[in-house]
Image (cartoon, rainbow, N blue to C red):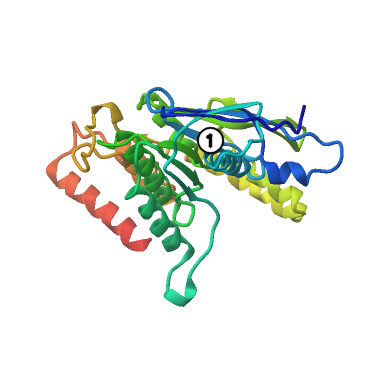
Amino acid sequence: MQNKYTRPQINDGYALSIKSGRHPVIEKNLPAGEAYITNDVFLDDQQQQIIIITGPNMSGKSALLRQTALIVLMAQTGCFVPADSAEIGLVDKIFTRVGASDNISSGESTFMVEMNETASILNNISNRSLILLDEIGRGTSTYDGISIAWAIAEFLHQHPLFRPKVLFATHYHELNEMASMMPRIRNFHISVKEAGKRVIFMRKLEPGGSEHSFGIHVARMAGMPQSLLERANELLATLEKSHGGGQLQGSASKRKPGKSAGDPFQLSFIQLNDPLLEQIREDILDTDINTLTPVEALMKLNEIKKLLKKS
């Protein structure tokens, strides 16, 4: 039955298992006859501590995070929950970093508020905490944002004392690489179907990461001018072809918990999204260092210096 509420099982363990969970408020406001798409969520401290969730805008990532929080909160207070079944260990705190807002009166930007709230979460976790993070790092430049999001997920996985359960929704597909480096991180995505130029949101959580955000499709749904959409597609194709890298380098398995600077993850210099750096990269790769004299090397450095001064 679609509107089934069940009595959750609360135990002393750390695992969280929800079968066919639903968001009670969204479900209540659906058009008559439209069924809510249910999803399963499993988190524990041994195999699947952190789930990285990718998928398009409007696909249902935030709804999944919110329904998980509501089900856990309802279970802790003794309520029946909107799911076929739920087994939930005791949870001491539900931390959320969802949505965007600023605090102009106190001189805090949207990004500063986001960082303040995230810092508060990271400084107050325990083994029984549930953490829901939605689009962390989106308020700054792409590379800053990826670096911050990656470091946060790594911090939560490598923490020397605690293993909180984490749902991390993001558009940074680079974070999918973490699952191959860290044993308790898993990749999931909200599935979609492409029908010509249309995108159909399936609202279903599936294993594996997503490689697309479909932002231009959402812009089309919003009614953006066709000429603008065509230009955006052209630019996207150019950027993906020219700068398909930007991948984080390093080996997480070699890092010890709590280690901060010995083996940093970094963005490759030659993959930065800048035509000038691409030009310098090609110039360096075309240089035969085996036949280069000291004077020629100095001249080459001087040429690169002049290029950078012009930018």
Reading the image, the residue beneath label 1 is 53
Q: Position of residue 300 (x, y in %)?
A: 24, 48
Q: Residue at x 67, y 44 (%)?
A: 58
Residue 248, position as x, y percentages in the image = 36, 37
How many callouts does the rendering have? 1
Q: Residue at x 77, y 33 (%)?
A: 196
Q: Secondary structure at mark 1?
A: strand
Q: Nearer the viewer, residue 138 or 104?
A: 104
In which quadrant will I find the C terminus? bottom left
Q: Find residue 283 and report its image quarter.
A: top left
In depth, the one of 132 and 293 nearer the eye is 132
Above or below 306: residue 234: above
Q: Position of residue 105 (x, y in %)?
A: 47, 77
Q: Give the residue drawn at x 40%, y 52%.
A: 118
Residue 276 in the figure: left or right of residue 5: left
- The answer, for residue 251, to whether it is visible in the render is no
